[in-house]
Structure formats: structure tokens, C-alpha cells
Image (cartoon, rainbow, N blue to C red):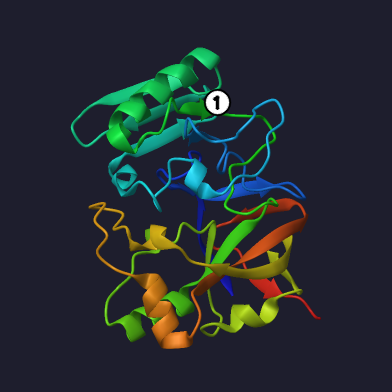
Amino acid sequence: MRIEQLYRYPVKGLTAEALEEVAVAAGGMLPWDRAFALVQGDAPFDPAAPGWLQKRHFMCLMANARAALLRASFDPASGTLAIRAPDGGQIAENALSERGRRHIAAFLTGFLGPEARGTPQFHHVPGHAFSDVRDKRLSLINLASLADLARHAGAVRHKRRFRANLWFSGAAAWSEFGWIGREVLAGGVRLRIHRRIPRCAATEVNPETAERDADPVAELRAAYGHPDLGVYAEVIAGGHMAVGDAMELLPD
């Protein structure tokens, strides 16, 4: 098996950033993955004691399809987050500063319009990740499984609908569901596969047009009797991995 693509998503719900290589710590996520989020004004989020919240409390594609039209990029060296809207509006601020986050919050709130609830705040809490699951995990998807879904659906489903950290090749379609509880070596990173990833309405959103033009959840259920695509993995031994590195399912 082989690592084909690596992605991080610095802002929850916004642009994927492709990585050629990355170092990952035990118990962690990809550096800067889901490090920032626009938290809706009615969400019970306390930055002094950050806890996990369901995605409905944030700007997210499940609820805010138009967010797919934003193009964002983050520079860890400077802390600069740049966001460009489809109408040409743009912002570039230091997302690691309180002042910069206030300006980013105002920009995103204006873009959301009536979808913004209360007074949203843009947050970054060092060490906290705005993940879809309670524990820090990497998401892995088998390219053969996506291809099999496309065959059943009769249409290509873009990888960006599913927002994985790691895409891999070389395994039979859906074989990854048999890896639950087992360990995988990805480059120099040792992973333990924890569970399947159930998909939600975010996958309906076309990443180019922001239109809800497909229903992968319904397609998965119709073809396989479940809504799952991909698996979550815990980093149990940190290390380095890169596009092109080998992956190996370790002996049970």
C-alpha cells in the first residue's frame, strides 16, 4: 500500500492544504489540522476550558454550504491566515493574535450573513483541535473504496467532499473496515485503527460550486447498507510520513 495524498484543514470547514510530508506526534493530529474555527455566537464554547462540541456549533459545510466558496491558506511561520471570498473580498490577518482573530471573525460573519448566529467568534486554543470526533484522530480513506462508491453511484465523487487527512492506494475496496483494532505503519508513523467514519450532509456539497448536488450518504446506504467511508486512526508512535511512503498492515 502507498500514501497518495496528505491534507490538513487549518480552519474547520474551509480549504484543504496539501502536504508533501509531515511529522506527527503520538496522540496528536496533523500539525495545524482543525486548529481554528468560527464558533457560532450561541455555542457553549469556553476557550479557557475548551471541550469538544458537535459540528453544528461551528461554521461547517454540513450547515453552511456557501463556505465551500471561500479559499483559505495558512502560513504557520507568520501565523497569517488569508481568506478570499467569491466576490473578490479578502482578508489576511495574524490568526494567532487576538486582534487578527477579531477581524477574521467579522469577515466570516459578514460572509455567512443570516446563517451567522449571535456574534460568532474565531478561536484558536493551543493544543485544542476542532475535530468532528472527541479524541484526536487522523482520517484515512482507501482510494479503491471511493472508486467503488463512484461505480455504484454512476458518477465521480470528488475526494474533497470527504475531507480526509490521508488517502492511500494498494488495498482492496472496503478492506480497511476489517482493520478495526489493528495497527498500520504509514511511513514512519504507527497508527491504530479505531472505527469507521459515518458520513453526514457535508458530503452533499460540491467543493467547487457549493451546490448540494449529490447525496453520498444515501448512495452509501443504497449500495452497502451503511453511511461509512474511511476510518479514524490514533497515532500511537509518532514519526514522519510523506506522499509516496509505503503503508503496511501490521500482524494482528
Q: Could you tell me the amino acid type at mark 1?
A: Ala
Quadrant for the C terminus, please: bottom right
Q: Which of the 4 image quadrants contains residue 152?
A: bottom left
Q: Is residue 158 visible?
A: yes
Where is residue 124 drawn, in percent x and y?
A: 58, 29
Q: Around disc 1, counting alpha carbons within 10 Å, would you say few (fewer than 14), some (14 to 19), or many (20 or more)?
A: few
Number of disc labels: 1
**Residue 72 rendering spot, x and y as whole percentages:** 38, 36
Quadrant (top left, top right, bottom left, bottom right) of the N terminus: bottom right
Secondary structure, mark 1, is loop
Q: Residue at x 72, y 63 (%)?
A: 191
Residue at 76%, 50% (x, y): give it: 27
- Residue in the foreground of this view, choosing between 84 and 1: 84
User: Residue at label 1?
Assistant: 77
Horizontal and vertical percent position of residue 242: 58, 55
Instruction: Name above or below for residue 72 compared with residue 249.
Output: above
Residue 9 appearing in the image: no
Q: Please, which residue is most extreme toward the left here? A: 87
Q: Looking at the picture, how far across and down is residue 151, in whole percent?
A: 34, 84
Q: Is residue 94 above or below residue 72?
A: above
Residue at 70 percent across and 25 percent down: it is: 48
Q: Nearer the viewer, residue 78 or 219?
A: 219
Q: Is residue 14 left or right of residue 43?
A: left
On the image, which quarter does residue 146 sit in? bottom left
Q: In percent of the image, x 67 and y 51: which residue is there?
A: 134
